[in-house]
Amino acid sequence: MKMDRMIGDVLDTLDELGIAENTLVCFLSDNGAQFPGGIMTLYDRGTGTPMLIRWPKGVKGGMVYDGLVNSIDIMPTILEACGVPMPKEVQGTSLLDVLKGNETGPVHDAVFTEMTEHVYYIPSRAVRTKRFKYIKNYSDNPFGLDQLNNKQWAHRLCELPDQPWKSPRVEEELYDLSADPNESVNLVNDPDYSKELEAMRELLREHMKATNDPFLDKEFTFDFKDNPEIVEPLEAGEKTY
């Protein structure tokens, strides 16, 4: 409700100034809900956030685009809308054709996400296509519960069957999102998906090379046993940072 009121204040002010029709407004949320498997993770529940764009004079309203887009696409979109030349080093892609209803193909064949540290050291890199998600972990440290670590209900949630949030992570994860949208069945060791696994590995590796990622070729480390505080409930009032 507070967020809705604040956004309303901005939009009302644009109306009062008489510039709403020709102002491009973009809304994004933070990364995922603060629940186990949301914030901090590279699963869709942690990275699949809202993106809403309004520009009454410049783009077609009322559309929903179900292709892959990324927050790095916002700057190219704004630059093109303003008629500013695109710097060569920009990684994103303008969404203006999509917003105008002219897009005939996907904006991206794949998008990339990463996490290195958030309260605890939980390094991961991921690539997502329309159908598959591949995650490369660099430590077996569990995701833990972050700011919910002193909430008993959150720890009880992790005790439900097949909940991995307080368990050691594996080095690689592969999910077929068309059949498994909750990313619960890791297909890394399934021979039927060996070609898809190699293709996703190569996609991520090429992206990490192109972006000079310091974790490229970094060894997987076993840190779980040395960090029990990640999974042990905090006392009420204690903070993780």
Image (cartoon, grey):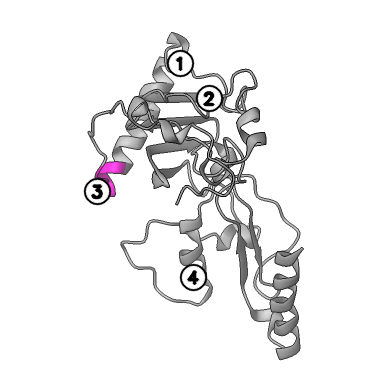
The residue closer to the viewer here, 118 or 27, is 118
Residue 57, percent across and down? 69, 76
Q: Which residue is mark 1?
A: 193
Q: CA distance from mark 2 to mark 3?
A: 31 Å
Q: Which residue is mark 2?
A: 164
Q: Which residue is mark 3?
A: 212
Region of the chain picked out in magenta, as a range:
208-214
* In the depicted structure, whether residue 114 falls above or below residue 77: above
Instruction: Please tell me whether mark 1 sits on a helix, a strand or a loop.
Output: helix
**Circle nearer the viewer, 2 or 3:** 2
Q: Which residue is mark 4?
A: 80
The residue under label 4 is which amino acid type?
Glu
* In the depicted structure, whether residue 142 falls above or below residue 70: above
The residue under label 2 is which amino acid type?
Pro
Q: Is residue 23 left or right of 233 when viewed as pictured?
A: right
Residues marked 1 and 3 touching at CB (< 8 Å): no
Residue that sits furthest to the bottom in the current view: 17
Instruction: Please tell me whether mark 3 sits on a helix, a strand or a loop.
Output: loop
The residue under label 3 is which amino acid type?
Asn
Q: CA distance from mark 1 to mark 2?
A: 22 Å
Q: CA distance from mark 2 to mark 4?
A: 43 Å
Q: CA distance from mark 3 to mark 4?
A: 27 Å
**Circle nearer the viewer, 1 or 3:** 3
**Circle nearer the viewer, 1 or 2:** 2
Q: Residue at x 46, y 57 (%)?
A: 72
Residue 83 located within the stretch drawn in magenta: no
Q: CA distance from mark 1 to mark 3?
A: 28 Å
Q: CA distance from mark 4 to mark 1?
A: 40 Å
Q: Residue at x 51, y 43 (%)?
A: 146
Residue 241, percent across and down? 45, 52
